[in-house]
Image (cartoon, rainbow, N blue to C red):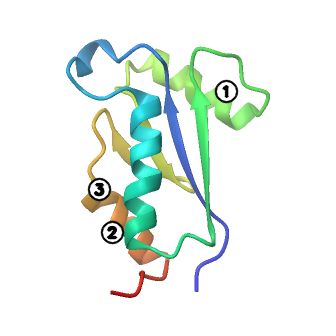
Amino acid sequence: MAKDITITVYGADQICASCVGAPGSKDTYEWLQAAIGRKYVADDLKYTYIDITHKQDDPAHQAFVDRIYEEDLFYPIVFVNDEMVGEGIPKLKTIYQELDKRGIELQEA
């Protein structure tokens, strides 16, 4: 079984200008927790939300926040550990594929 998997969502309260009509970053963060929790045993999953409008204490998070602004990336952006699996409007199928690769246990039917 996989251990220590972190799902990180980078986003902001204001919806990305290119993502008008999409849910907000916080809504996406909460939606992902619910959707993943219905499919997988979430004992080894941690969730982190990074508000890109605030300075980050962690240099790695700050470097990625800087990259979001420099490259005009669409947010929210979803990572499974160090793998970016969603940008703008994340797709559950892509996130599930990454969790499957990492051996996350499925819920019993």
Residues packed near mark 1 inside 10 Å, few (<14), some (14 to 19) or many (20 plus): some
- Labels 2 and 1: the sequence-earlier one: 1
Residue tagged 1: 62
> Looking at the rendering, which quadrant does residue 43 occupy?
bottom right
Question: What mark, if any, has residue 97 been given in the picture?
Answer: 2
Between circles 1 and 3, the one closer to the viewer is 3
Question: Is 58 placed above or below 34 here?
Answer: above
Using the image as rendered, state which of residue 88 and residue 26 is in the foreground: 26
Residue 92 numbered mark, or none: 3
Front-most of residues 77 and 14: 14
Q: Kindly state the secondary structure of the residue where label 1 is placed.
A: helix
What is the x, y in percent for residue 32? Answer: 41, 50
Residue 51: give x, y in percent of width and height. Answer: 59, 24
Q: Determine whether label 2 and label 1 are within 8 Å by CB.
A: no
In front: 30, or 93?
30
Quadrant housing the C terminus: bottom left
**Residue at screen point 25% across, 61% down:** 93
Q: CA distance from mark 2 to mark 1?
A: 27 Å
Q: Is residue 84 among the parts visible in the rendering?
A: no
CA distance for labels 1 and 3: 26 Å
Q: Position of residue 70 (x, y in %)?
A: 47, 16
Q: Which mark is residue 78?
A: none
